[in-house]
Image: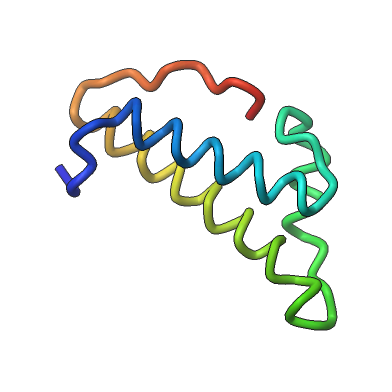
């Protein structure tokens, strides 16, 4: 285990952050195509690109957490709005 001892709590915290950054980027986290387009749309300046990069990193972290859960034999709950 990587230190994530309470998977449901950690997933909920990640989902809140993902929803926050998705809102900053102007995308619905439930709209996969919009989220994918957003994370590929690199902005020229750092302040404009920071939310997009944060969203991308949080999505990668969520996938890694789900992978870890599966490795422990725990099935991740369905994503609400993601």
Q: Residue at x 18, y 29 (%)?
A: 72
Specify the quadrant of the image occupied by residue 44.
Answer: bottom right
Residue 25 percent across, percent down from the top left: 79, 53
How many badges with numbers are in the image? 0
Viewer-proximal residue, 40 or 78? 78
Specify the quadrant of the image occupied by residue 70.
Answer: top left
Residue 82 percent across, percent down from the top left: 63, 29
Q: Residue at x 28, y 38 (%)?
A: 68
Query: In the drawing, does residue 17 fall left or right of residue 64?
Result: right
Residue 3 percent across, percent down from the top left: 18, 47
Q: Residue at x 18, y 36 (%)?
A: 5
Q: Residue at x 65, y 65 (%)?
A: 53
* Relative vertical location of residue 44 with respect to residue 73 in this rendering, above or below: below
Viewer-proximal residue, 5 or 70? 5
Query: In the drawing, does residue 19 fall left or right of residue 74?
Result: right
* Relative vertical location of residue 68 with respect to residue 72 in this rendering, above or below: below
Q: Residue furthest bottom?
A: 45
Query: In the drawing, does residue 35 fall left or right of residue 53?
Result: right
How was the colour assigned to the protein in this rendering?
Answer: rainbow
Q: Residue furthest left?
A: 1
Viewer-proximal residue, 9 or 58? 9
Query: In the drawing, does residue 3 fall left or right of residue 17?
Result: left
Residue 51 percent across, percent down from the top left: 70, 62
The quarter of the image holding the N terminus is: top left
């Amino acid at each position: 285990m990587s230190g994530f001892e309470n998977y449901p709590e950690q997933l909920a915290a990640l989902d809140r952050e993902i929803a926050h950054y998705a809102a900053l980027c102007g995308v619905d986290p439930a709209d996969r195509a919009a989220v994918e387009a957003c994370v590929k749309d690199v902005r020229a300046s750092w302040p404009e690109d920071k939310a997009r990069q944060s969203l991308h990193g949080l999505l990668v972290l969520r996938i890694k957490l789900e992978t870890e859960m599966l490795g422990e034999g725990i099935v991740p709950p369905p994503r609400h709005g993601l």
